[in-house]
Amino acid sequence: MARALKCATKFMISPTAMQQTVMTEAAMLRSFIVFAIAWLALASGCARWPDTGVTSLKPATLSELVGIVLKHKADVDEFRLRGPFDVTTQKDHELRLSTTERIDADLYLSAPAEKAPLVILLHGHDNSKEDHAYQAIHLATWGMHSLAVQLPNNGPWIGNGRTLARIVTLIHRRPEMIDSRIDINKIVLVGHSFGGAAVAIALAEGAPAVGGILLDPAGIGKDLPKFLRKIGKPVMLIGADERYSPVRERRVFYKYIRRGVAEVSIRDASHDDAQFPLVPAPQEPGTDSIATEELQITFVSALTSAAFSLAHTGKFDFAWTSFGIAIKNGKFFDALKK
């Protein structure tokens, strides 16, 4: 219980840090219910807030952290640990794309006062922004603000990709709608499953992001290759183990993105391991999820290394080097890049 209280206090919503936005009564109630469920689950030990430990690095600023990390020998396991910074959470932060179009998103702000990267995460089919809560928090502890967005979770995924591109463009023009500390030149897109396809489409449509990370992405049919051929930004694909968890048309991403793409698979991981909700969803009859916390943490570490590398260097070279030991010992496999 003491551990639950300690964790919850660190990540609890801070009213003084919240932006002064007007919420409807329904949105306020929804936000309260979501937070109450997470709190009760955390206090009862049901929430997936794993005790991964905290990095021994104690930087005074984000710039100091970046300097230390990039100068050290890269190792993906370092990113299994929670980063050195506190996080403030804003649930159901409303993004206004137009006078009639609103998008809900959960915002996870890293503590440093200086400008920092923004990682935008998009869920897959039949999933939600809450399914990437732990990933978003973990990224923010490493000095990267995170925004988990909610788009229609049954598609259309080309439409979702174009909406995502509009979201990125709006934030790039008006970062204060999120936070004045957003570095608009360091926006990273992350998508899971069909959300990975939407991220690829957003990049092809010219979203002003530095690149994308695809978490076990799924293809969406014959129209996808024409988008993939247009991508000119770095892309990293972090996949599950296709021997146990094959995903529709995953191989088209590496095949059709012309250059600047890397791919690696995580041994024994399932498609659902590429997500990490704080509160596990109840298993419905007939479901076959074999997600495990250990493999979800492995995905988190690979994602964090990739996002840190892309945000602060504009490339995946640092992350690729950090995967070296895991590739050598077979934990990561089918490593490809071009």
Image: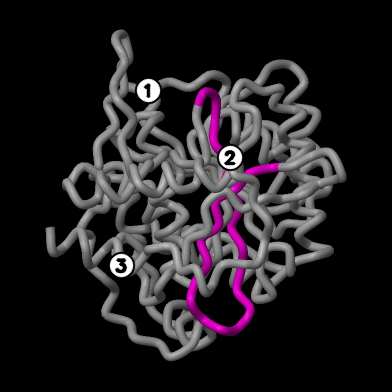
Instruction: Report if residue 57 is visible in the image.
Output: yes
Task: Locate residue 46: give its quadrant.
Answer: top left
Q: How is the image coloured?
A: one colour
Mark 2: secondary structure: helix
Placement of 146 over or under 221, stated as above or below: below
- The residues colored magenta run 103-126
- Camera-near label (2 vs 1) is 2
In this view, which residue lies farthest toward the front? 25
| x then y, percent, for residue 208 | 79, 56
The numbered dot on residue 9 is 3
Which residue is pictured at 26% across the width and 80% down the height? 56
Nearest the camera: 296 or 73?
Answer: 296
Q: CA distance from mark 2 to mark 1?
A: 38 Å
Provide the residue designation for mark 1: 245
| x then y, percent, for residue 15 | 50, 68
Nearest the camera: 12 or 85?
Answer: 12
Q: What amino acid type should be assigned to the residue bearing mark 2?
A: Ala
Is residue 192 left or right of 260 when viewed as pictured?
A: left
Instruction: Report if residue 338 is visible in the image.
Output: no
| x then y, percent, for residue 165 | 77, 45
Q: CA distance from mark 1 to mark 3?
A: 37 Å
Provide the residue designation for mark 2: 26
Q: CA distance from mark 3 to mark 2?
A: 25 Å
Q: What amino acid type should be assigned to the residue bearing mark 3?
A: Thr
Mark 1: secondary structure: loop
Q: Main secondary structure of the magenta part?
A: strand
